[in-house]
Image (cartoon, rainbow, N blue to C red):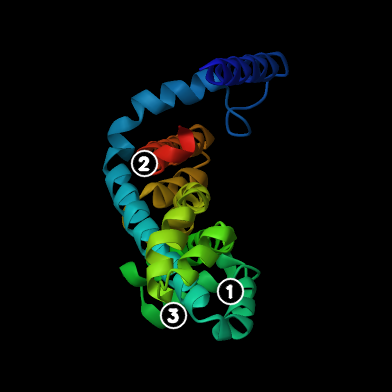
Amino acid sequence: MRYSLKFGLFIAVLLLLWEMLVRLLHVDSYTLPAPSAIATAFITAFPDYKDDLVPTILLVLAGLLVSIVVGVGMAVMLHLIPALEPFIYPLLVVSQNVPVIVIAPLLVIWFGFGLLPKLIVITLVCFFPVTVSLLEGFRSVDQDLRKYMLIAGASRMQIFRKLEWPGSMPFLFNGLKIAGTYSVMGAIISEWLGSDKGLGKYMIIAQRAFQVDRVFVALVWIVIFALVIFSVIKVLEKLTVRWKHD
């Protein structure tokens, strides 16, 4: 709670300085609008962008779900079949060094303007932290417990289900927090490719019309979505990994 109050005070001070500098320096609204102008547009322009909120939310949730499935599946496969890691892990690293904004137009050419290229973009952005964090969790379990289970005659899958998977949950949620915040950015980038609805489309239209205040309105909603997803994941972590917090 104390951390939240300090952060809120910090943001309030930044907004106040922003407002003062814009007014004192007479900065044009199409260059950098004041926070008060953005707040006004946030309310008055709501009828214009309200239909763009739901498509972005649904795209974020769908992309995040696919990213979690791919990320967890990749980590489990590499952990249970170590012989694959020298071949697949470098490819995973390479996938994070290819700029998504560059490969995105190719995805449109290959798969069209439907949902699939958008999900691929979000997955490319989000799956890696899930995979890396979960792999680290698998390798960080108590080795003494592992030896004890081997001595007791536990099979490889029993060790995985009863020791490695539960023990890696804190690491998994750390990866999910990163992926959850990245998923919003990935959804916006995918909407830039070509979409009839969504905040990404709204941002492009506002930018071309030099309505910078509305561009910032979209940015505010992006931050809100990211914070909500991060908070939901934290709540799920507390409910799932109770022993860690206790």
Task: Determine whether 84 is above or below 15 in the image.
Answer: below
Report the residue marked by disc 3.
109
Task: Determine whether 18 is above or below 58 in the image.
Answer: above
Amino acid under disc 3: Ile
Say whether disc 2 or disc 1 marks the residue closer to the N-terminus: 1
Q: Nearer the viewer, residue 2 or 168?
A: 168
Q: How busy is the neighbourhood of tag 3: few (under 14 within 10 Å), some, or many (20 plus)?
A: few
- Which quadrant does the C terminus fall into? top left
Q: Nearer the viewer, mark 2 or mark 1?
A: 2
Instruction: Tell me how far mark 1 sits from mark 3, CA to CA.
Output: 23 Å
What numbered label is drawn on residue 92? Answer: 1
Left or right relative to 147: residue 184: left
Dots 1, 3 in contact, CB < 8 A: no
Instruction: Give SS at disc 3.
Output: helix
Report the residue marked by disc 2.
236
The image quarter in which residue 196 lies: bottom left
**Can you give x and y, in whole percent of width and height, for residue 51 in the image?**
26, 43
Instruction: Give SS at disc 1.
Output: helix
Q: Residue at x 55, y 18 (%)?
A: 8
Left or right relative to 242: residue 141: right
Q: Nearer the viewer, residue 186 or 2?
A: 2
